[in-house]
Amino acid sequence: MNDPRIETLKASNARGDFAASLIFQYEDRGRLSDKQWHWVVKLAADAAAPAPGPVAVGTFTGVFQLIERAAEHLRFPKIRLGFGGPSGIANDLVLKIAGPRSRYHGDILVTDGGPFGDNKFYGVITEDGEYAPGRDARADADVAAALVAKLTSLSEDPQAVASEYGRLTGNCCFCSRPLEDDRSTQVGYGPVCAKNFGLNWGVKSRNSEVGLGTICDNSDVDPEEQS
């Protein structure tokens, strides 16, 4: 007889490769790790909870175009931001378009950038700007409010909001590498990422030395493809 927790997960509306994988591993081996049991219970509970309606955060066409342009050169283009706290960037925020293995294929996933299974899932955004809050946004009203504010600002001016994060942190808002050139720091991203995302790199500072500055490639392996 199956563990009642597995039966609860099966009876829930939990979907996706992760839930199916947990069920398969239990039925194949007859056991799961403590961490896997944690996710069995959490996924079943999340599926049973009523999902809030979508929140309008403004049209995301510009954000989609930015990422899609970079996808012509990169495997897993992302936009890295921050939100919340006095600085406005206290929490990590990463946006990417979900791949074909995801149940959200074609929409933008909003997470903290951690590996799938260990990340914070803040929700999904359609190109029309309908934001469906995820489990980690629904769990905290302050987090949800800060997210909506940041996403709304991003929809209004994607380049300016992304650039601001790079300027404030000193790391590229696309590949997260340190910015070491004056021009890169001024615009919040390096010259290679600027080319990949189709953006201007800025005006050379009088104090800048000649050179390419920070080299960004944004070619990291994507651990979230099953989100």
Image (cartoon, grey):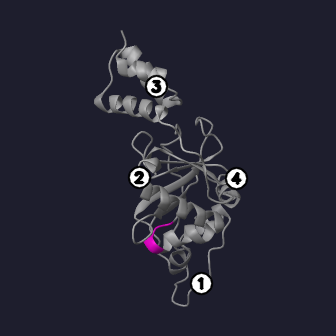
Residue shown at 59%/63% (left/top)? Answer: 152
Residue shown at 51%/55% (left/top)? Answer: 94
Q: Is residue 171 magenta?
A: yes
Q: Nearer the viewer, residue 92 or 67?
A: 92
In the current view of this chain or complex, which residue is farthest to the left? 34
For the residues labelled 3 and 4, the Cα–Cα distance comes to: 32 Å
Three-letter amino acid code at disc 3?
Ser
Where is residue 81? Give x, y as percent. Answer: 50, 62
For disc 3, the neighbor class at 10 Å (few under 14, some 14 to 19, many from 20) is few
Q: Residue beneath label 3, please? A: 21
Can you see residue 176?
no
Residue shown at 39%/67% (left/top)? Answer: 85
Q: Residue beneath label 4, please? A: 128
Residue 39 versus residue 10 in the image, above or below: below
Given contact means CB atoms under 8 Å apart, are the residues at marks 2 and 1 in contact?
A: no
Report whether 72 appears left or right of 122. right
Q: Residue beneath label 2, please? A: 140
Where is residue 43? Give x, y as percent. Answer: 43, 32
Quarter of the figure with the N terminus: top left
Q: Residue beneath label 1, please? A: 204
Three-letter amino acid code at disc 2?
Asp
Q: Which mark's residue is nearer the viewer, 3 or 2? A: 2
Given contact means CB atoms under 8 Å apart, are the residues at marks 1 and 4 in contact?
A: no
Image quadrant assignment for residue 157? bottom right
SS type, badge 3: helix
